[in-house]
Amino acid sequence: MPSIQVRTYSRGYPRLAALATLDKEYLIFRQFNYLHARVLLDLQDRLQAYEKDLRQHDKLCRNEESLAERANGLRPIQKTDLFNNIEETLKRYREV
């Protein structure tokens, strides 16, 4: 790796980034563990609520769905929206 002249970079983040590339010992980043934990806990709460909503919706559908709707395989819009929310939240949870 060619020698980096740190002082040739502008003060602030450009110079700090140049310094950090000189040696891995200089590379120190915060992990924000507390914030990650809070975000994950919030996403878990959302997923748990969606799970409860889905169980309630399924129970309601078992009681109210007509034979014709079952035969046609119709899915109420509300359930589709719920699954979209679940899918997006699960993606975010995996990413974090």
Image (cartoon, rainbow, N blue to C red):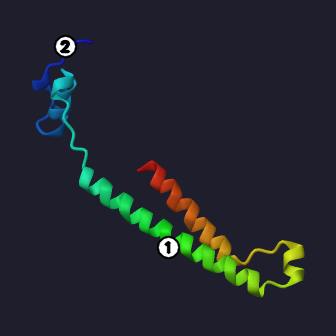
* 81 versus 95 height, above or below: below
Crowding near pointer 2: few (<14 within 10 Å), some, many (20+)? few
Question: Label 2 amino acid?
Answer: Ser
**Residue at position x 25%, y 45% from top?**
31
**Residue at position x 85%, y 76% from top?**
70
**Residue at position x 24%, y 12% from top?**
2
Q: Label 1: state its secondary structure.
A: helix
Q: Quadrant of residue 40?
A: bottom left
Q: Quadrant of residue 5?
A: top left
* 30 versus 89 height, above or below: above
* 58 versus 83 height, above or below: below
| Residue picked out by circle 2 | 3
State the residue in front, 84 or 46: 46
Tell me the tag on residue 62: none
Residue 68 in percent (x, y) is at 89, 81
Q: Quadrant of residue 73?
A: bottom right
Residue 12 in percent (x, y) is at 13, 39
Residue 14 in percent (x, y) is at 19, 35
Residue 71 in percent (x, y) is at 90, 74
Tell me the tag on residue 49: 1
* 63 versus 9 height, above or below: below
Question: Label 1 amino acid?
Answer: Ala
